[in-house]
């Protein structure tokens, strides 16, 4: 089942032309549309399903700098600055709070890794501190657990996944953008190796600039145009409780992570637990992803299911004048694993006995898309003028969303980038110049 999501209306008419078309209305695409419209550009935001319907409403809601790969930290820092002002600037609460994030563990190697990251934090001036066992226990009062240690990322926080992308999209509309849901982009109209339009199921939009922020669907869209984009997705399960006693705002432990929502419910998940499904796309890029899988995916199981035959990683192409895979699956909404729901709930109740009688309101599945080095692509694509790719966020897209959208917008119109875009270049995944696999 899909998580609760605030719905917004679509504009009635598809424009014949726009300065920029943004494909995919998750957090990154909605942010890109917002910042572009604020600069006076005409923008059409097209979405095959509903705004925020896929991963942007299915995540923990964390907005963090703590434990970021150094390549992502400048973007994460700018994202936090943008999160601070979005509710005020748009005039609607996006749910962002600098609540602080708490990490606690009894795993000495994990604590050592967090301690090692302090060197990175100091280079960038990040406000974080290590916790002793007694400090971690005091900050997680109610667990009854003793801890070896932990981390308190003082100035990090959370936002509301049910609201963030819709509020940003409405902010874009207030600045003149148009929003088109249930409007799949089937492909690009290309003239002399340059974008000249976007072919949607409802008609052609003439444009010279496109941002593709299609999440788990991005590689398939690129492949249809001969663009190589290595991408793999992990299927995960998350649950949300009914309103519960106030425990804390956001906590990570190796057993589970909890995030308090605006209404007093909790989002609960197990970090790193998921299923890597065997798919044609996965097999195509298996060699490129193998080092990352070995290093990072300790709790991932392998599976085989319907995603081999349908969805973003399946075989097949499509014509632009008939139904495409994007229309056949409006919202990528995998069935949550009952086993994972039961395990997650049991771990949460063991951690916090106050949750013992709190019921599960909803649970959902999601696909977390990744790149081989676990660093996103936010980049123009060589050999196709006017095309910017923003995808592969590797579970980091929600918190980075405002700055990632801003950077994609900068690159699409040739403005000064909000951060150095080089770490996010698409070419690194093609020419062998990518760096090490991200630590977190």
Image: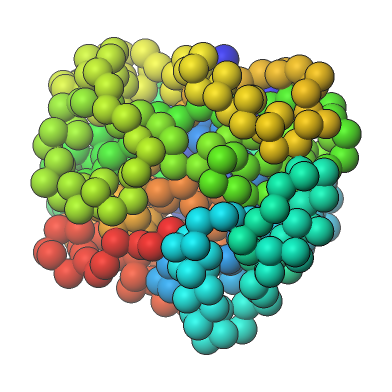
The chosen color scheme is rainbow
- Residue 21 sits in which quadrant? top left
Picture coordinates of residue 266, whole percent (x, y): 74, 34
Q: Is residue 411 above or below residue 349?
A: below
- Total marks shown come to 0
Q: Foreground residue, 419 or 366?
A: 366
- Residue 246 sits in which quadrant? top right
Q: Is residue 324 above or below residue 257?
A: above
Left or right of residue 14, residue 274 in this image: left
Q: Is residue 85 above or below residue 230?
A: below
Left or right of residue 254, residue 225 in this image: left
Picture coordinates of residue 338, whole percent (x, y): 51, 14
Picture coordinates of residue 325, whole percent (x, y): 31, 19
Q: Foreground residue, 364 or 184?
A: 364
Question: Residue shown at 27%/36% (left/top)?
Answer: 221
Left or right of residue 418, residue 227 in this image: left
Question: Residue shown at 49%/79% (left/top)?
Answer: 120
Is residue 201 among what the camera can see?
Answer: yes
Q: Foreground residue, 66 or 35?
A: 66
Picture coordinates of residue 112, whole percent (x, y): 48, 69
Question: Residue shown at 43%/59% (left/top)?
Answer: 440
Residue farthest along the bottom direction in this orientation: 123
Is residue 406 among what the camera can see?
Answer: no
Question: Residue shown at 53%/74% (left/top)?
Answer: 115
Q: Quick one: quadrant of the N terminus?
A: top right
Q: Foreground residue, 82 or 284?
A: 284
């Amino acid at each position: 089942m899909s998580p609760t999501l605030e719905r917004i209306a679509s504009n009635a008419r598809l424009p014949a032309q726009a300065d920029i078309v943004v494909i995919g209305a998750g957090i990154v695409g909605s942010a890109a549309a917002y910042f572009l419209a604020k600069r006076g550009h005409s923008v059409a935001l097209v979405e095959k399903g509903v705004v925020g319907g896929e991963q942007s409403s299915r995540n923990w809601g964390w907005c963090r700098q703590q434990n970021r790969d150094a390549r992502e930290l400048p973007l994460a820092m700018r994202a936090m600055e943008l999160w601070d002002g979005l509710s005020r600037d748009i005039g609607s609460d996006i749910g962002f709070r600098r609540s602080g994030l708490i990490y606690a563990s009894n795993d000495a190697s994990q604590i050592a890794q967090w301690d090692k990251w302090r060197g990175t934090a100091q280079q960038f001036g990040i406000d974080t501190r290590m916790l002793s066992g007694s400090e971690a226990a005091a900050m997680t009062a109610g667990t009854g657990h003793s801890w070896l240690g932990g981390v308190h990322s003082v100035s990090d926080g959370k936002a509301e996944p049910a609201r963030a992308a819709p509020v940003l999209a409405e902010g874009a509309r207030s600045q003149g953008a148009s929003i088109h849901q249930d409007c799949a982009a089937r492909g690009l109209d290309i003239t002399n190796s340059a974008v000249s339009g976007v072919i949607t199921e409802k008609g052609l939009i003439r444009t010279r600039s496109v941002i593709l922020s299609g999440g788990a669907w991005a590689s398939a869209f690129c492949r249809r145009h001969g663009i190589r984009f290595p991408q793999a997705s992990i299927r995960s399960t998350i649950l949300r409780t009914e309103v519960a006693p106030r425990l804390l705002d956001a906590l990570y432990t190796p057993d589970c992570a909890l995030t308090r929502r605006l209404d007093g419910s909790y989002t609960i998940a197990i970090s790193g637990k998921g299923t890597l499904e065997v798919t044609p796309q996965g097999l195509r890029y298996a060699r490129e992803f193998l080092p990352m899988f070995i290093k990072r995916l300790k709790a991932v199981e392998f599976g085989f299911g319907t995603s081999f035959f349908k969805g973003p990683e399946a075989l097949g192409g499509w014509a632009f004048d008939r139904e495409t895979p994007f229309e056949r699956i409006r919202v990528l909404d995998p069935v949550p694993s009952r086993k994972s729901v039961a395990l997650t709930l049991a771990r949460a109740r063991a951690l916090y006995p106050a949750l013992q009688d709190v019921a599960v309101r909803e649970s959902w599945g999601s696909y977390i898309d990744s790149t081989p080095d676990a660093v996103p692509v936010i980049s123009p694509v060589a050999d196709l003028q006017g095309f910017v790719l923003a995808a592969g966020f590797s579970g980091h897209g929600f918190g980075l969303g405002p700055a990632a959208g801003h950077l994609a917008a900068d690159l699409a119109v040739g403005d000064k980038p909000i951060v150095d875009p080089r770490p996010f270049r698409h070419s690194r995944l093609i020419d062998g110049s990518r760096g090490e696999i991200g630590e977190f």
